[in-house]
Image (cartoon, rainbow, N blue to C red):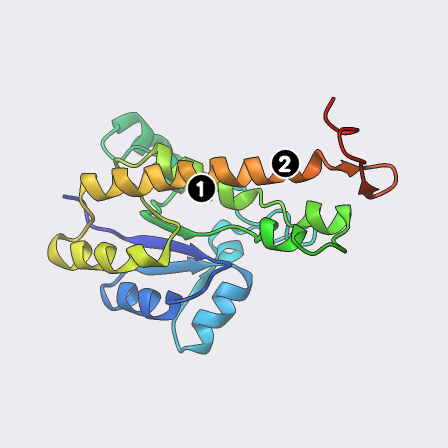
Amino acid sequence: MRKVERALISLTDKSGCEDFARALAELGIEILSTGGTAQKLRSSGLEVKDVSEFTGFPEMLDGRVKTLHPLVHGGILNQRENAEHQKQCAEHGIKPIDIIAVNLYAFSKTVADPNCSLDDAIENIDIGGPTMLRASAKNFEDVTVIVDPADYAVVLEEIRAQGNTTLKTRFRLACKVFELTSAYDTAIIEWLRKVDPETNGYFTRGEGDA
């Protein structure tokens, strides 16, 4: 079984992330991170590599573009037992990312505020997070994807025991991802259908249903 080399941690819900990252580091796993998560981990004394350093490309457009890069998605999506994939990764300097611990911008919490503007809502629609999650879940045979801090313990237990998680665990966690992203997209469209983009206000009942 191939051992885990690298994890990318980028979280809105940071509960338990320091202990999780510290345990991974103690197992010799490189930690990649972004923004506030990277700051939080560093403040705990952990060595963290910014995704921008990993890709050689800066975060830009007010943070809208930071993980949308071939070195990130190639690292996630390459099939480790596919010789052609591995040849292409070697040619382009793509390193494997074996664990993705990501949760999403709190869209539902943002729009629960009755004074939430359309602009605020739009800025809280996560793009990079769902993209990484879906990529990781698609490649569950090789990648462990975590959206719930409650799963940190079992992931660590399995890595300590055998250097990686079991296929059964990776598949279960991948299913959780698609449940989450489906609910996330549903929450977005249900809110947007209520909003008039021209006035930044709400439609009256039934007006936005067409």
Identify the residue at the far top of this view: 210
Label whose residue precedes the other's in the sequence (1 or 2) = 1
Q: Which residue lies furthest to the left in this view?
A: 161
- Real-space CA distance between mark 1 and mark 2, rounded to the nearest whole angstrom: 15 Å
Viewer-closest of 54 and 45: 45
Which of 65/177 is in front? 177
- Rendering quarter of residue 82: top left
Indicate the position of residue 204 as horizontal and vertical percent values: 81, 36
Amino acid type at image mark 2:
Glu
Residue at 69% x, 56% y: name it. Answer: 113
Whether the residues at callouts 1 and 2 have beta carbons within 8 Å, the answer is no
State the image coordinates of residue 63 (x, y, percent, origin top left): 64, 53
- Which of the two discs, 1 and 2, sits closer to the camera? 2
Residue 89 seen: no
Q: What residue type is labelled 1?
A: Leu
Residue 95 position (above or below residue 25): above
Q: Name the residue under label 1.
A: 180
Where in the figure is residue 6, as x and y percent of width and height? Answer: 32, 53
